[in-house]
Image (cartoon, helix red, strand yellow):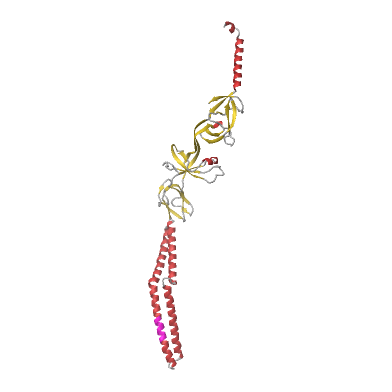
């Protein structure tokens, strides 16, 4: 020991020689790479996105007639029932029009009743009287003709008697026409009935205009917005309120169109409102839009919520976790081991006999941190995880399990 300590250079040479030997041995074995095994396990693919609570029936309440607002019956956030008053417009003029139209109906109806009950009787009596007058005139004409033939009367008396007959006959014809006109299907009756129908139509229209001054809720629901106040002068088509009608709430979100092939009706999802992240509830795909949004490159998807929690409000932000596929005992590898995964030519490195081997693979579903391999590698294959140093096929490596 004393002799060696006096020769420190010898120790340095020995250490350097040993280090060189170790380096040569490591180089012979190749550089180390992180690896994982291709294993079988159950795998699910999910589409996760942010969406909103969608109200299927959102009613825009508007005025149909211009006027002064004299009452507003609901405020934002208030629940209303069908028939509840929302907005009342001044109806004084409309009520006056209804009264006037009602008077016209009564008058027209009275005219029809008069023709039916009195007119027919009067017309029949007029015909009977005309018949009597005609008979008398004809009898008188016959007497005058005999006297004129014997020379007892002048020709003027005969002419007068003839005119009396002609007049009586004309009066009878007029009475017959009046009786026919007064009959249920006669001209006078038709005119009277037409006037009655016209008055009734005007009365109905006046009632409609009166009803339009009272704007009511047509569905049970919640008032979302209100943009009218007492004293406002409103015009037709102006939106006064928006009411969310009671209905089963739905969720709507817009995943990337690349996920469209995986989404189908009836798929189950788990969702939660951003305001209540701990409250998770079930949902189900009920609608997939038939077209793509060209600006966003996304597709609209709606989900029904069979048992909606009470805290869901219209337009509330929600997070949706949609399960689009599930394979049992799928052959999987870590997702980051797959190169060019978004292209048809996906591949990965495996370690075989301490060397890198490039494998072209066919991918299946993709879960959280794992990807299914349908073709290209077998169960138990040693796949290489990506590292900072680029690799090439055939390179000698030392596999180190992560």
Q: Which residue is located at x 44 percent, y 63 percent?
A: 201
Residue 186 pos. (x, y %) = 43, 72
Q: Nearer the viewer, residue 103 or 143?
A: 143
Task: Tell me the magenta residue range.
Answer: 131-139
The quarter holding residue 352 reads top right
Q: Quadrant of the N terminus?
A: top right
How far across and how far down the image is residue 164, in percent?
Answer: 43, 84
Q: Main secondary structure of the magenta part?
A: helix
Name which quarter of the figure residue 295 lies in: top right
Is residue 117 shown left or right of residue 393? left
Across and down, in percent, residue 244 comes to: 44, 47
Q: Is residue 369 visible?
A: no
Please check the rendered image and state whether residue 136 is part of the magenta-colored stretch, yes or no.
Answer: yes
Would residue 142 be seen by someone viewing this image from the given angle?
yes
Question: Which is nearer the eye, 191 or 63?
Answer: 191
Q: What residue is drawn where x is 60% and y is 12%?
A: 14
């Amino acid at each position: 020991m004393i002799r060696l300590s006096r020769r420190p250079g010898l120790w340095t040479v020995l250490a350097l020689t040993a280090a060189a030997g170790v380096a040569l041995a490591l180089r012979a074995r190749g550089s180390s790479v992180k690896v994982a095994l291709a294993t079988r396990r159950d795998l699910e693919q999910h589409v996760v996105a942010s969406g909103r609570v969608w109200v299927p029936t959102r009613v825009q309440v508007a005025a149909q007639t211009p006027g002064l607002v004299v009452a507003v019956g609901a405020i934002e956030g208030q629940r209303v029932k069908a028939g509840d008053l929302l907005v009342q417009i001044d109806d004084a003029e409309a009520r006056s029009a209804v009264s006037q139209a009602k008077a016209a109906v009564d008058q027209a109806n009275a005219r029809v009743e008069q023709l039916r009950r009195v007119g027919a009787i009067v017309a029949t009596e007029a015909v009977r009287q005309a018949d009597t007058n005609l008979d008398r005139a004809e009898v008188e004409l016959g007497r005058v003709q005999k006297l004129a033939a014997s020379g007892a009367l002048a020709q003027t008396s005969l002419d007068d008697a003839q005119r009396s007959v002609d007049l009586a006959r004309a009066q009878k014809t007029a009475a017959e026409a009046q009786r026919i006109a007064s009959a249920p299907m006669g001209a006078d009756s038709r005119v009277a009935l037409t006037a009655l129908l016209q008055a009734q139509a005007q009365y109905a229209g006046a009632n409609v205009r009166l009803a339009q001054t009272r704007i009511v809720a047509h569905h049970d629901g919640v008032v979302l917005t209100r943009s009218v106040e007492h004293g406002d002068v409103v015009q037709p088509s102006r939106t006064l309120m928006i009411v969310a009608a009671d209905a089963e709430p739905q969720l709507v979100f817009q995943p990337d169109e690349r996920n469209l092939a995986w989404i189908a009706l009836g798929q189950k999802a788990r969702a939660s409102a951003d305001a209540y992240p701990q409250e998770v509830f079930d949902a189900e795909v009920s609608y997939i839009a038939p077209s793509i949004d060209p600006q966003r490159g996304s597709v609209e998807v709606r989900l029904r919520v069979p048992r909606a929690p009470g805290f869901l409000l219209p337009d509330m932000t929600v997070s949706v976790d949609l399960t689009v596929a599930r394979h049992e005992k799928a052959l999987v590898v870590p997702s980051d081991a797959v190169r060019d995964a978004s292209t048809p030519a996906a591949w990965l490195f495996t370690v075989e006999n301490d060397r890198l081997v490039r494998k072209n693979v066919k991918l299946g579903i993709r879960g959280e941190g794992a990807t299914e391999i349908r073709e290209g590698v077998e169960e138990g294959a040693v796949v290489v995880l990506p590292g900072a140093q680029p690799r090439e096929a055939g390179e000698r490596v030392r596999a180190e399990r992560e």
